Amino acid sequence: MSSIVMPQPDERILSRAPQIVAALRQALPDDAVISDLVETRAYECDALTAYRCPPLAVVLPRSTAEVAAAMRVCADMGVPVVPRGAGTSLAGGALPTADCVVIGTMRLNSFLEIDTQNRFARVQTGVTNLSVSAELEPLGFFYAPDPSSQLACTIAGNIAMNSGGAHCLKYGVTTNNLMGATVVLTTGEVIELGGPEMGPQGLDLLGLLCGSEGQLGIVTEAVLKILPRPEGARPVLIGFDDAEVAGECVARIIRSGILPVAIEYMDEPCLRAVEAFARAGYPKCAAVLIVEVEGSAQEISDQIARIRAIADALNPVEFRESRNADEALAIWKGRKSAFGAMGVLGDYICLDGTVPVGQLPFTLRRIGELSRHHGLEVANVFHAGDGNMHPLILFNANEPGQLERAEAFGGDILRLCVEVGGCLTGEHGVGIEKRDLMSTQYGPDDLAIQMEVKDVFDPQWLLNPAKVFPLDASQPFRERVA
Amino acid sequence: MDSMSDLAPVDEAELAAILRDRCAARDPVWIKGGGTRIAPRRDAVLDLTRLSGVVTYEPGEMTLIARAGTSLTQIREMLAAEGQALAFDPPDVRGMTGRGGESTIGGVVAANASGPRRLFAGACRDHLLGVRFVDGQGRRLKNGGRVMKNVTGLDLSKLLAGSFGTLGVLTEVALKTLPAAHDQATLQFDAPTEADALALFCAALATPFEVSGAAWHGGTAWLRIEGLPAQLTYRRDRLLALLDRKGAQVLDAAATATRWQDLRDVHHFQGAMPLWRLLVKPTDAPRIADALRGLGGDLSLDWGGGLIWYAGPAAPADLRELVPHATLIRPAGLTASIFPAPAGPVARLSQGLRRSFDPAGILNPGLMDG
């Protein structure tokens, strides 16, 4: 039914399943190893639910030492390892294979140290993203990256995928907020990269590790940069009857020297869906921007006045300012329910390409044309300030052939993103979903050097194999060690 | 052209041809941008200054793409004309290294060079969107791109930043630009000891007032604030009230610019003494400062205490016992390695990466091996 192919599981591994499970049980506490099919099925997929496969076994360690012990067993027996945080990847980053052991981080859930003097938090990486900021709130601090799955997703997954969020226009993504990591290598060795110092010192292995999608090692502890909470934040809503003018407004705001924490964009199909679902009271128009600024009350008023002056010159349909917390919530309500609203309309694929901000109007127009060509509806809701688009392609999974059509449409959009100077994925990662499109963005040598880097960390190609790199490109590496 | 710079490619293709030849012959090169940072060794000098020019600058997209040999001064001026800047404010290192030359943007990225604003805005690598480079086999490679959010494949751009040419020769860099501060001011305090300075820094940096510089030298501490006019007044007043120190002074925008340029370029430690750069956990700075003083010389703090500049006669082994990662910025006659050697599995990984990018070991050989 679905079009992304995974390699056949290795029979030599499957035939040794009982011995592998026994070796894991010997190396780890009893309750840390799951091999019963009823239970392993809970780990058969992540948020890319069209692809499923129960693993050979699941290991849920409670410490770095236990992760290292599990990794040693797998390396000794030549068993692939799929690292898993909360399983919220939209790209299939945590999809198991039948011959793999899933090493999950969810029991690594302790806060180890919070140091407001030096402005860092040291955590085990199974803690959820939101729980970090919750833990910091009484101290007046927060952790900036805020992916929309933040209630569930773990810091381990955030580091593996270099997650972003709505506020990264100002605060950057995970790699800009990660100071250090404790990493288990495939050898079972444990290394410390970075720390409370403002590194890097020597080669930036931490920067390489962040966003490496579980290809290089498993991060069990992290040192996170923490920031003082802003005094306040307020959004404004600006409606335009022309999508290109909305794009121009984004560019002018950025040029003006104001740096909002977020600039979100919703197009007409998205607005229609959101209105039907959440009744957010948004204007009926071609495009809506939500712009959020931070600071003291006076700082916020000053910045909003400047944004109003910029918007007014472009004849908006509406400029709505929130005067209190309730009105601020009302402005965010539609945006935050956008994905839910789309879910009511049917199944959807959420894409994640980034384009240069100046190419947004052209890209949107072209996506509209592609939508008519493929006969599938698309809605756009995205982080406009940084050009990270999230086109949602609507389809009906029960109708044969629709998933494949939606995937083909998605492929066209991502190729378009690359053509206009952007990239395949801004924050979701490559996983299996975009694996075979990598060669549209990178030439053979560009991919080869990345695979050679993986080779240095994982010479047996055991970590999350058959992901990130196109299968035909990675085949020589994978077969050499098989 | 003198014999020290007989390799001066005009474009990436010529550079790739040179490196393919040198790789086949296992003949090393010493990579030189503006020549401001590190003295070339005996090996052939690979001069990149002819690989220059801005490829594209889009202020509305906050994006700059420039060839590696483009002068930093030219880029600063071009950005300033649009009210923008490189937020990590790379230093002019000539006073620190005691060398001449003219910094290039490729050199800035290869050194991951970041000024006092690193505290607030992040390092050079945090503003790097993508790179083009040629590796030690002469392969022409790219990584990242020109957009602000990009998680497509392994992030080799970060790895190249700060690798000092040991993994590849940068030919083109894409950087995020940001609006320059509308207005700025500096709060200046008496702080006789490093411990006094740290108390000020920790208090100020725990506020939401976006302090963009926190430095100390010779009994005086400085905090820089920035923003729109209303923001600046508000932040100044709130910080002065919070820190409640007698004799605090406020420097205006012009004085602030001069003060922080001097601090950025470590103007206070020009001269004949070796100069070292030490990265530490900020609250460890007073203890380490005491130990350094025991070894002779003088020191200053930046990055809220996280960066110690030490100018003095201490023996390299003593310094690296105190701070293992101590980096020698101005040798001033010392023969010690610039960077310490990595150890353990990290050393194995670093060497493995070097072999992947540069199997014949021809790019700045020995520079990062301790």
Image: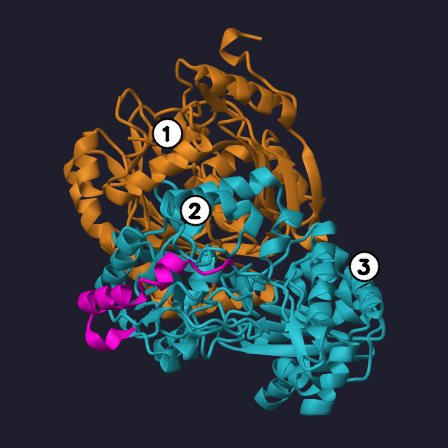
Magenta span of residues: A7-33
- Give the amino acid type for the residue marked by disc 1 in the picture: Gln
Going from the N terminus, do you reach mark 3 or mark 2 first?
A: 3
On residue B121, the disc is: none
* Element at label 2: helix
Main secondary structure found in the magenta portion: helix
Q: Calculate the distance from the C-alpha at mark 1 to the C-alpha at mark 3.
A: 52 Å
Q: Badge 1 is on which residue? A: B270
Q: Secondary structure at mark 3?
A: helix
Q: Is residue A59 left or right of residue A441?
A: left
Closest to the observer: A264 or A41? A41
Query: Of residues B243 and A31, which is closer to you in this image?
Result: A31
Q: Are marks 1 and 2 on the same chain?
A: no
Q: Are marks 3 and 2 in contact (CB under 8 Å)?
A: no
At horizontal 62% and vertical 45% (from top left) the residue drawn is A442
Q: Say which amino acid is labelled 3.
A: Phe
Find disc 3 in the rendering and name its residue. Answer: A362
Q: Is residue A134 left or right of residue A420?
A: left
In which chain is the residue bearing label 3?
A
- Say which chain is cyan: A
Amino acid type assigned to the residue bearing label 2 in the image = Lys
How many marks overall? 3
Q: In the image, which is nearer the foreground, mark 3 or mark 2?
A: 2
